[in-house]
Structure formats: C-alpha cells, structure tokens
Image (cartoon, rainbow, N blue to C red):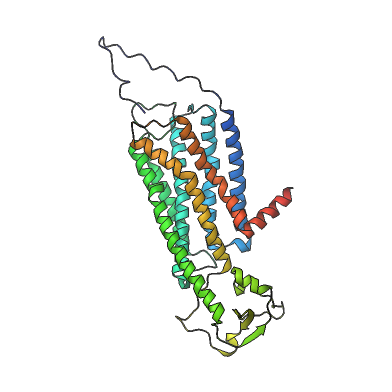
Amino acid sequence: MGNGSAGAAPCNGTAPPPPPPPPPAGHNIAALVLGIVLILLIVGGNGLVCLSVCTERALKTTTNYFIVSLAVADLLLALLVLPLYVYSEFQGGVWSLSTVLCDALMTMDVMLCTASIFNLCAISVDRFIAVSVPLNYNRRQIDLRQLILISTTWIFAFAVASPVIFGLNNVPNRDPSLCQLEDDNYIVYSSICSFFIPCPVMLVLYCAMFQGLKRWEEARKAKLRGGIYGGNRMLYHPSPFIERERVGMEPEEYHPYAHPEHPLSGDYVMSNGLQTVSYPHLKYPHPAHGQKRAKINGRERKAMRVLPVVVGAFLFCWTPFFVVHITRALCKSCTIPTQVTSIVTWLGYVNSAVNPIIYTVFNAEFRNFFRKVLHLFC
C-alpha cells in the first residue's frame, strides 16, 4: 500500500530518488515442503470423495452431492491457489510475478474460500428443509431445488470475488513486490459477505435442524415403544435387527428375515423387547393423501451428525484468518506481525485437507471406499 508520499518532489524540482529495492528474500524451504504435502493431501483426499460419490450407490445421497461441491472447491484451491501461494512463501513473501497473475490469485482465493462456506450454508439450508418439511423432500435423487442451491453458492462466490479481477486492486502507488488485497473497504466487505454473515445464519439453521431432528427421534422412539403401526403383526424373537433398530437403521435398509425369493415388505416395530412386522398392504388400503408417514432414514441421520464436525473444523481453521484480516483493514494503528498473517493463512488452507479425514472417521461408507481404493495401491 502506498503511503502517499512517494510522488513528492524536493524544493529544487528534481525527481525524488527511487525507493530502495526490497532486501533479497530468503528461500523458505519449510513453506515449500508444507505446501507440497498439503497440495497432495487435498488433491488425494477430495479426489477420493468425488470419486466415491460418483461410483458408490450407497453414497449417492443428496447431502453427499453438496459435499462433492465442497470437495470441488477444495480441489480447485489446491490446484489454482496453493501453488502460487507456496511459490510466494518460498520466496520469503516477495511477489516476483506479474500483478495480473496476482489479481487472478486473489480472485480465486476469495472465490474458493467463499464457495466453501456458501456450500456449508447450502447444506444447512437443505438439511433444515429435510427435517422441517420431510414429506416434500426428495431423498432419492438430487432435484431442482438442490441444483439451484449448489449453483447459487458458486454464482454468489464469484460475485463476491469478481471486483478484484475487474481492477479493484489497481490502486495508485501499488507495490508490485507484494501480492495482497489493496482496498481496505473491499477487505471489510468481502469478509462480511464471505464469513461474518454466513456463519451465524448457518449456525442458527443447524440449531433449528437438530431441534427438529431431536423431536423426530423422540416421536420415533415413542412409536417403537408403543408399537403404533397398524396391520397384521407377526411376532419374532429378538434378533440382530433389534440392534439395527436401536442404532437408527430403517426397515428398508435391513431385512433380517428376507429371502431373495420371498422378500418381506412389512413395517418392523419394537415392543417390550420383541420384534414385530406388519403387512398393511395385505389387509389395509394405502394411506390417504395427507396421512403419508415421513421418514428420515438411518443414513441421513448419520450424515447429519457428521456435518457439525465439518462446520466446527471450518470455523476453527478460518476464524483466526478472518479476524486478523478484518482487524488489519479496520485498525490502522494495529501492528500484526507477518508471521501471524502467514500462520492463520496456512491454517485456513489446512481445512481443505481436513474434510476428507472427517468423512473417513465418521462415515462408514466413505471409510470402506477409501480402504478399498488404498488396497489397490498397497
């Protein structure tokens, strides 16, 4: 940033001497090694996430399509942003490339970070709808509403970042040896749009979603205890299905007494430690419109429980960056060491490598796919 005095001339009218060149930057080997390792982890982990959802039938859920969109943002960050950032850090923080390339780097950085948090917001909106109006929610395949949500996240992310590529960084007395956002007002604007507004909205939606999910679980357990399903019931002794029901598996996900030639299609119920199955279609008509029973299956509930971990990891990694970022823009008298800025930026980028690890730890389907792929190479 220029200080406004570089163009002042002395009394004799001669041109001022040029500013001294920046000291030669030392090569930051640690940044180079960390950057290469981080790029490999992000590309490998998020690539496996995308591949798993595309190839595994069990992972083709609406929530996971949003997770793929989030993984694409992380992949693009690793391929388009991190190599240039690592190069700059390797040069000791001195930017030796063109200012046009710097502006492209800043645009992509802002857009992909914004896309990540907007994708998390879109997931929270989608999950809130799934819990609040389950009868109108399509669980089997992605529908128009979800496509609009995913598209909107990317359109808004580009809208927030686009002023940089359209010339906002071309300020007078710009220092070409530094690659940074040059307009303090834009720093405040982008931080508010990308982080400080979406985060509270997302947290409120998740709180409402889990309150709704808690009420749904309580109603479900009450039905299981009371055996509130009509129809002809057949009594079975306790079986492994009881444990599946206890941990949240739905009837359509597990049929312990089904045979390929004689499939069962009844409703399973727990009552006094025994398992019952009803066949309403044998004796009773199908439920009338308005009486259809909505279900949130076991796979969806497991996916919902992973999401707070993903959101928590995002907030842990990116909150320090945005606090430092907006403080530097708003407080001119505050001195923030370069090392602090570098650390919080690295921490933010680390988040792109964390998400695949979270899915592997908390989701059995992702874990099984990752294990299967790793066995092919080991």
Vertical placement of 265 versus 319: above or below?
Answer: below
Q: Is residue 279 visible?
A: yes
Q: Total of numbered circles in the picture?
A: 0
Judge left or right: residue 258 versus residue 97. Answer: right
Q: Going 48% across and 67% down the picture, which residue do you hit?
A: 213
Q: Going 64% across and 80% down the picture, which residue do you hit?
A: 274
Give coordinates of residue 281: x percent, y percent. Answer: 58, 86
Question: Between residues 274 and 348, which one lies in front from this camera angle?
Answer: 274
Q: Is residue 50 visible?
A: no
Judge left or right: residue 372 versus residue 27. Answer: right
Judge left or right: residue 158 versus residue 368. Answer: left
The residue at the far front in this view is 272
Q: Which of the 4 quarters of the picture holds residue 236?
A: bottom right
Give coordinates of residue 159: x percent, y percent. Answer: 39, 47
Give coordinates of residue 331: x percent, y percent. Answer: 34, 35
The residue at the far left in this view is 11
Give coordinates of residue 26: x percent, y percent. Answer: 54, 23
Q: Which of the 4 quarters of the picture holds residue 254?
A: bottom right
Question: Between residues 203 and 38, which one lies in front from this camera angle?
Answer: 203
